[in-house]
Amino acid sequence: MTGEQFLKEHNISEEFATAQGITWDDDYLYFPIKDYEGNLLWNKPRNLHHKEEGHPLANESKYKNVFGSNTDTLFNWYSVKDKPSIVFCEGEADAMKLTEEGIHAVSSSGGAGTFNNDWAELLKDKKLWLCFDNDPAGEAAVRKMFDIFPTAKSIELPKGTKDICDFFVAGNTKKDFIQLGKESVGSGEWQKLHRLPEFDLISAGDLELMEFTEEPWIIENVIYSQGFAFIYGAEGTGKSLLTLDMAKAIITGEPWLGKFPTTKTNILFIDKENPHPMNQRRLAGMGITKEKLGEIAENVHWLKSPEKYQLTDFNGEATEFAKELSQIILEKDIGLIVIDSFVDLITGNENLSGDTQAFFDGIRELYPQIAYATLHHENKPSQGASRSASQRLRGSSNINAQAITMFRLEESRRATDELLVTQVKAKDSQKLPKFQIKMKIKPNLSGGTTVTGFEYMGEVDDSAEIDSTKSEEIKMSILNSIAERKFISRQDLLSMNLGKKATIDRVIKSLSESGEITKRKEGRQTIYTTDMFSSTDYEGILEELGTPL
């Protein structure tokens, strides 16, 4: 394309272009960028051969960077600064075409999405019309401009018309453009006309007729295809190892633990807990290698530099790292992100609902419509306090509210390689019964052991397990109270509401038979102590109880 052809395609006369200081050569057409007094700052080169097949400049950018071009300028301001009404458009060619037609116009020298905050002061007293290209970038620019100039009006180009120059090339006149100005819309009406798709509503009838081809579960009843699954437990309960076992089942399409059907998808670990050498050893132990699985082993990914990942900055804005990862997730067709761990990714305080909500909102906005398996830790129960599995989760209650499924992992009392899995939450299905799993372990060459996977051991008698857990809590409360106070009376013990009287009696009997505590009867009171206290201590206990010696 020649400079003359460019001007013709944009319906700008050569005489007018020359008068405005526009020049051209064989490769570039130059728009003069001037300061607010009309003095030339630099010439902006427009590549005349951009995407022109066979030309050496075809793959070069549309505009060439030159000295001074990193400073965004309000193009053509010097000629319209005294005018009461101005059209703000997308590019220099559009501004020049409107100027040739006798319509006062400016644009940004940096493109549709660029706006210098200093320009707001220059334009604040002007009657402002907005007329950007008919494409997503232009629409986003208008939305941004309305935030800055809520009283502006938007000139809507006809459908199929790319930009202002295209409007005039189609044979329209100045009178036609002015008519569009008369039909322009304000911010509220424009928002209705250009409402973002995510704000669309669907009726019950619409939803009934919609077809969903994707499988609803990645791991049936464990990880839903969209939303958060939380897996939590005390330190060292094997949470990270368990998610690797899940990952192997998902990428191979085999049932997890031989019991829960899976749907294949690609996986990304955002892992700030475990170093790469450790993950390498774990993957080898579990057989998640190209040697064992072939190319499907490539469907599990890690961030190379997880320490650089931060979801948001301290202003609540998504970081460039997080935004770039969004594109990579699309390219790699990731369907599940494993977050290890929650506390490493949240910006702020995990105990505050506002901070946790910002985390959930940020993740969903950046990486929408996929699943997240999020690892978290639990609190230790306070002395004498009885907590359910869900109450052991650390942090704000908003975490529970946001999860679709939630599981607590704990060591079995029988063996350290056996774990109990309790489903704490199931948003749209019946909770799974508590079940037991066992680590598959084999010796390694360094003299240690390697976890090679997990196996399903069957359901657990929940009532028996609850009773066992309750008994252990009562036992620790009794022993801790005696250690602190040298005794505990039966009256005090029952007032702590630790559990059923029958369970308390059973624990006391067990402790007495094992010799861990001594039961004494003083008048109408029963007290429990240990043999570690002297007779003097015992006399002090009786005095505290008000029992005569």
Image (cartoon, grey):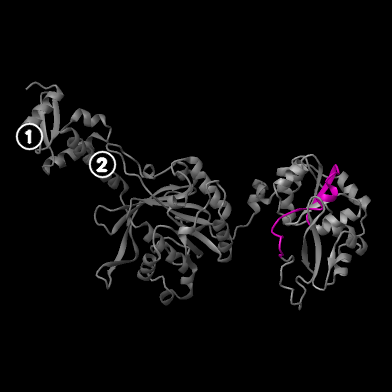
Q: Residue at x 53, y 61 (%)?
A: 335
Please tell me which residue lies in front, 287 or 63. 63
Which amino acid does the dot numbered 2 rest on?
Glu
In the displayed structure, does residue 32 sit left or right of residue 305? right
What residue range appears in magenta? Answer: 65-91
Distance in Å between CA atoms under marks 2 and 1: 27 Å
Q: Position of residue 234 (x, y in %)?
A: 33, 50
Residue 261 sits in quarter? bottom left
User: Residue 534 — which label?
Assistant: 1
User: Residue 517 — which label?
Assistant: none
Please tell me which residue lies in front, 108 or 67. 67
Question: Of callouts 2 and 1, which one flags the residue occurring earlier in the amino acid sequence?
Answer: 2
Please tell me which residue lies in front, 432 or 97. 97
Please tell me which residue lies in front, 356 or 12. 12
In the displayed structure, does residue 120 sit left or right of residue 443? right
Q: Report which residue position mark 2 lands on.
A: 473
Q: Residue at x 41, y 60 (%)?
A: 243
Which amino acid does the dot numbered 1 rest on?
Ser
Q: Position of residue 8 (x, y in %)?
A: 89, 66
Q: Mark 2 against mark 1, which lies toward the viewer? A: 1
Secondary element at tag 2: helix
Can residue 68 be seen in this snapshot? Answer: yes
Q: Position of residue 65 (x, y in %)?
A: 71, 65
Residue 352 vertical placement versus 304 (above, below):
above
Secondary element at tag 1: loop
Q: Position of residue 81 (x, y in %)?
A: 83, 46
In the displayed structure, does residue 154 sit left or right of residue 72? right
